[in-house]
Image: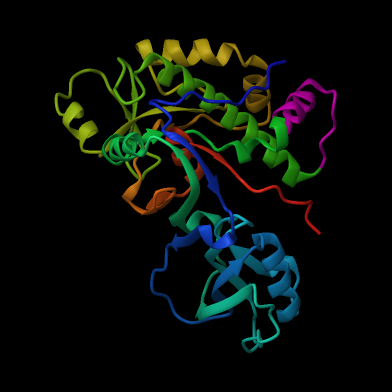
Amino acid sequence: MDTDTSTPRAGACAGTALLRAEPADFRVDERIEMAPEPAAEHLWLRVRKTGENTDYVARLLARIAGVDGRAMGFAGRKDRHAVTTQWFSIQLPGKPDPDFSALPPSVEVLETVRRQRKLQTGGLRGNDFVLRLREFAGDARLLDSRLEELRRDGVPNYFGVQRFGREAGNIERARAWFSGALRVCDRSERGILLSSARSAVFNAVLARRVAEGNWTRLLPGEAVQLDGSGSWFLDDGSDATLPERLAAGDIHPSGPLWGSGELASQGEARLLETDVSALHADLVGGLEANGLRQERRPLRLLPRNLAWEWLDDTSIELRFGLPAGCYATTLLAEVLDTREPERGAPG
């Protein structure tokens, strides 16, 4: 069974570059919901970590606080090979703030605040990135031009390759599980495999629309998604303002996050989605059988405040923000072939 997760670009590749030569070349700052609320038993910490993954830092904070993993919360997992700033929460009923002075230099607590509730994944609004690319080889003028296009038109909103595991292994395991050839009892692993399968079907629909050149326009029967929202409405052809709203970034074409129930789209848009989904019938069937419901995701990703600066002839720094669930590597892949240094297995 085909497990190819490669995705076509919407435009030309400008060259090659080295990414993450060192952790500081990939900086991420989390944006979360922080509505005012009274101080209570949940301690929220804004933490800067260097070269560490989120789960490791959560375990480290829990050990110092003397709590188990169920007391911990965070809004999203962040890259290990990076310098990332993110929030964690620790439930400490009737307990004082722990002393975090014993943390290693790679983990710094920047600020703390007491709040009423645990930090949940849904609280993540997005992430701001500063990426430094080195050893660029290619056409610098073309790269500038392509970045201008991205700033104006956005990029195809593919799920990143990290969603599928090493060599797309998550997709192979999902297929084996759905067919009954593999038992998957762990709830967390089930979630990972369902997410990978759903992402693969979405990417396949988006790849078809990129290949056909219609990923930035509304097809007849489009399920139109509001920017920054899970809400959508059907384009029945009666609203003459939609092209203007599309150009302004207020709305986007959308694709299916597969599950049971009727597709939101109609007409030409639905025909394309059903045609592509039929090529992945095993994944579609497994998603439906495991209780997921139809949802939508924008086909177009508009980076927030995209800017760049050439540091020298072969180094460029990019700054931009993305909504939650979107990938910086997806943006980079639209304009460059990037490589990373060889790294040994984690210790």
Quadrant of the image containing the C terminus? bottom right
Residue 262 in view? no
Residue 211 in view? yes
Where residue 6 appears, as percent x and y from the top left, is 57, 25
Q: Residue farthest to the left?
A: 240
Main secondary structure found in the magenta portion: helix
Q: In this view of the protein, which residue sits in the foreground, 31 or 117? A: 31
Tell me, yes or no, whether the highlighted magenta stretch contains residue 177.
yes
Residue 182 is drawn in which quadrant? top right
Q: Residue farthest to the front?
A: 313
Going by the image, does 287 lie left or right of 17? right
Where residue 93 appears, as percent x and y from the top left, is 64, 81
Q: Residue at x 66, y 88 (%)?
A: 99
Tell me, yes or no, whether the highlighted magenta stretch contains residue 236.
no
Q: Give the vertical position of 43 relative to 203 (above or below).
A: below
Q: Which residues are magenta?
A: 169-185
Total of numbered circles in the picture? 0
Q: Residue at x 41, y 21 (%)?
A: 210
Going by the image, does 61 lie left or right of 122? right
Q: Residue at x 28, y 39 (%)?
A: 148
